[in-house]
Image (spheres, coloured by chain):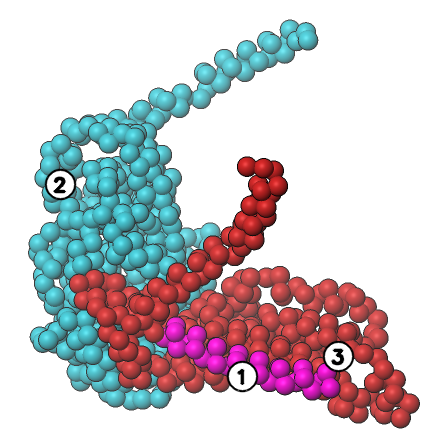
Chain colours: A cyan, B red
Amino acid sequence: MRIPRRWISALLLTGIVATQVAPPAAAQESEALAYYRQAKINWRQAEGQSLTIGLNKHPFTESLLPLIPQFRALTGINVEYLILPEAEYFTKLAADLSQQRGEFSVIMTAPIRNWGYVIPDWILPLDGFLNDPKLTDRAWYNLEDFFPGLLASNRWSGKIGGGIGEGPLYSIPVLSETYILAYRKDLFDQYNIKVPTTLDEMAEAARQIKKNAGIPGITARGTPSVASIGTGFISGLKSYTDNQWGELDAQLKGNLHDPRSVKYTETWVNMVRESGPANWANVQWYDAMEAFTAGQAGMIADADFFAANYEDPAKSKVAGKVGYALLPAGPGGKTYASLSTWALGINKATKNKDAAWLFVQWATAQRTLLNATLGFRNYNPTRASVFNDPEVQKVMGSWGNGGYLKTVARNLETARVAWIPQPERVRLGDIWARSLHEIYFQRMSAADALKRADAEIDKVLKEADIRP
Amino acid sequence: MTTARRRRRQEALLPYLLMTPALVLLVGILYPFSLGLYYSFTSYWLQYPKRFRFVWFDNYISLFEETLFDRALQFTLGFTVVAVILQVGLGLAIALFLHSRIPGRAVLRALMLLPLMMPPVITALMWKIMMASTNAGILNYLLSFIGLGPVNWFGSPWGAIASVLIIDTWGNLPFVALILLGALQALPTEPYEAARVDGAGPMAMLRYITLPLLAPFIILACTFRAMDSLRIFDVIYATTMGGPNDATTNLHIMAYQFAFQWYQIGKGMAQAVVLLLLVVLVSYMLMRLWNQASERTRQ
């Protein structure tokens, strides 16, 4: 077949233009990898090995996935991943860890989850990897760049009832959250409502919003699960009791029936019953977040980084109308919010431990976390350098006219992991949340429901040999 | 070896060869079942592997101390009774309607099958959106036109129970209607002709001919629906997760929570075995009724 000459000319011309206009892919990739190659380690020491990463469906996961090809190019390590919704993910993870098959090499975890994995010896301490010069260039990696409180929350001595911030580092934080109050500033101004500083004021503000604006005054998680306890509710309770109270006493017995806890619970539940959404008992975190984003609630006491959603004009009806404040304080005048991080850890049963560490090191490196935040909205950053990056500050600084950043910074001064470390935290939280339903539906008084929950908690902790 | 001997040998092997898939399937079912049964007699708790030991019937006995067990058992049985009555009753009415000479019967029959083609989880999620507690949910919006609602579908115990019942009924009604419609079409015509000659009206024919002849099929539909209703999981898991206030926690959800949420495999398996025994017992009783009804029909 004879090919017309003008076709050949057009083809050649296109080729020339393409090479002139688009920068060569290899050069782009090399530029991106140059940062990592500054580390004085051999990134290709585990070349050819394979890793499977266990991931929860979460904004952090969304921010990590687009960056993974870079890790493959840098190390020659093949990476596969399994992403599951949270409940299914932790079930699958527990099954894999307990069978010691090492299906997942790297896992997405959290300090409060680690307590259940350290006792049966399922996950590896990471200090050995960090201190091995063959595997980690400490100066380049700059562990000290992580906020000390966040890093400390991922350390645990293994002592039931204490030991947070002591002992081995089990995971490296990739996203942090504390719990704050987000409120509809426009409605608060319009109806002359005071931003609450005590629980009673919060209940009153919720009532006023419902009465005047005709929408629920507050939205909150309400399903009978630990997830409904661990954010705004427990943070408010810690603050209400001036951080002088815990869900277990010194003998590790249930302490929910403490009068301060009973009073707080009564007020909180009455507030959501009177001024909350009608379907509170079926509200998951995303329902609460979406309701507030859609302008269907006056307040929400939950994760600070939900602000990324509230302030996104593309999907939010309240962008630019939200104020941020600390959760109501206790008699001492201070707020003690809970704190949580999502983090990456390593399965003890994995065969490719060094490759797994290289992945964790890459995924938590300064540049990777900066790219995840700037490019894919991984808020809140866990490294100070990412948090303070001018671009990141510009984005977060615009939320709530600067109120967001100030509130988060103040919250972090006193925020700590609220839970008492022990491996049955999920069970305890589920029992606790069920007692809130008994109170909400007025089947039991707060005192009786919490007393019964304590008895159940005592039984479980005894059965698990956690207390004598 | 002669050709005849080889052929004889091949023929002798043939039954075993044909049975192989069934045997593989049997092992595939029996192995996990036996393992589950074995675990129900152990203290298997995922997070505490060192505590693993044989505990005989401890897990079964401790069930009666669980605060949740009473509620779960009550809901399991109560839901089954109401769901079976509702679904078989409505299914019978639909079957009778579609059996009569109405225009567009073929189209209606085809449309009726649509819910059967959807996976139960998708059905549940679809209804969850439609049943939003405010008027944002289409169901409450429609109810507002007749002056009802808004109904707090998933946020109140009775609302949640009703929601699960409605979703389950929507998904399974076609199955019941289909069985009964098939049976109606296969009924002999002679008794009806005789009754017509004797001057019987439609209600009398329904009561004295149709229902007695349909009895074995009605019991069969009840058996299928009772078995499914006793162990319903997907609809509850996708909508209420057993709440609120444990109102929709049945034995299956409870077993799931123990085994996969709290990792107490031993206890979870014991609950699953109790549920299995319940299903077997109820099915056995219904199958006996079915046998009796079939005998009567033959006579």
| Residue B294 lies within the magenta run | yes
| Residue B167 lies within the magenta run | no
User: To which residue does mark 2 refer?
Assistant: A130
Residue B134 seen by the camera: no
Residue B255 versus residue B23 in the image, above or below: below
Q: Are marks 2 and 1 on the same chain?
A: no
Name the secondary structure under disc 3. helix
Of the image marks 1 and 3, the number of the one nearer the N terminus: 3
Residue nearest the observer in this picture, A461 or A437: A461
Q: Which x, y percent locates residue B58?
A: 26, 78
Residue B192 versus residue A401 in the image, above or below: below
Disc number placed over residue A334 in the picture, else none: none
User: To which residue does mark 1 refer?
Assistant: B285
Residue nearest the observer in this picture, A131 or A447: A131
- Front tag of 2 and 3: 3
Name the secondary structure under disc 2. helix
Chain designation of label 3: B
Tell me which amino acid carries mark 3: Leu
Q: Which residues make up the magenta segment?
A: B271-299
Residue at position x 56%, y 72% in the image: B167
Tell me which amino acid carries mark 2: Leu
- Front tag of 2 and 1: 1
Q: Which x, y percent locates residue A151?
A: 16, 51
Name the secondary structure under disc 1. helix
Disc number placed over residue B96 in the picture, else none: 3
Whether label 2 touches label 3, CB < 8 Å: no
Q: Main secondary structure of the magenta part?
A: helix
